[in-house]
Image (spheres, helix red, strand yellow):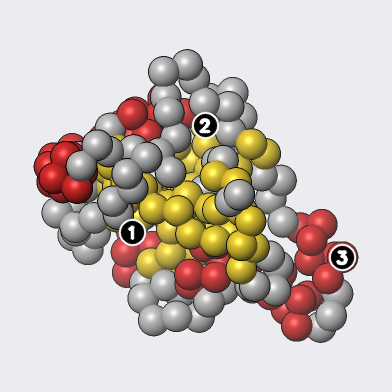
Amino acid sequence: MKEKVIRALYDEKTITVYQAYNKTIALHAIKAQTFVSPPFKRERMTWIKPSFLWMMYRSGWGTKENQEYILSVKIKREGFEWALQNACLSHFDNAGHATFDDWKKKLQTSPVRIQWDPERDIYMQPLHEQRAVQMGLSGIAVEKYIDEWIVSIEDITAYAQNIRELIKAGKIDQAKELLPVERRYPLPDGIQLMH
């Protein structure tokens, strides 16, 4: 059984999500403490990830093209929960939808897509029994994210590179000590996780 729960760094009011961007988008965002159009494109789907290690896997620890800057984005928990309430799975699952057509209709109208991928360990190997969530925001969800939900944006590229160097040097315990402490996120009543 694959465990699908949201693990994240969070406090009473905020939850931390991660994104990776090129230098231009990242530096504008850090300065303004939100995403600035241009260079950020509001009309495109933007993906947020609560899992630090999944973000490191996706961005190659900030080495992939246009993902050289790793950003830690604190957003309001109420915004994150709105996104969950207004989401549709990015692929059809008959446990969540009666028919393929029902799912297709919901996918076309939902401002948020949810995707579950194998969580990663510190070596970037997939943890097949654990799933990490990523959320694709579009339309009204992007507007809310940029204009209402973001509390702070921090450049954590050097922090991520430091962890990567420790791993490369075989100092795994030291690297693990630096990882953010991600705990199971408590979902409010009425929000069902889509699998």
**Res 141 visible:** no
**What is the secondary structure assignment of the residue under circle 2?**
strand
Say which residue label 1 marks: 28
Secondary structure, mark 1, is helix
Measuring 78% from the left and 75% from the top, which residue is drawn there?
A: 166
Numbered circle sitting on residue 36: none
- Between the residue at mark 1 and the residue at mark 3, the CA separation in whole angstroms equals 35 Å
- Image height check: is 176 above or below 148? below
Residue 148 screen position, x and y as percent: 31, 31
User: Can you say whether 13 is above or below 183 in the image?
Assistant: above
Nearest to N terminus: mark 2 or mark 3: 2
Which of disc 3 and disc 1 is earlier in sequence? 1
Residue 53 in picture, x, y percent from top left: 61, 61
Assess disc 2: are there few (<14), some (14-19) or many (≥20) residues with their C-alpha within 10 Å of its C-alpha.
Answer: many
- Quick one: label 3, few (<14), some, or many (20+) residues within 10 Å? few
Instruction: For the C terminus, give its image quadrant.
Output: top left
Q: Is residue 98 left or right of residue 15?
A: left
The residues bearing labels 1 and 2 have C-alpha atoms spaced at a distance of 22 Å
Instruction: Indicate the amino acid at tag 3.
Output: Asp
Counting from the top left corner in percent of width and height, residue 13 is at 53, 25
Mark number, residue 14: 2
Q: Which residue is depicted at the point 14% across and 54% down?
A: 43
Q: Which residue is mark 3?
A: 173
Residue 113, x across and y down, in percent: 30, 47
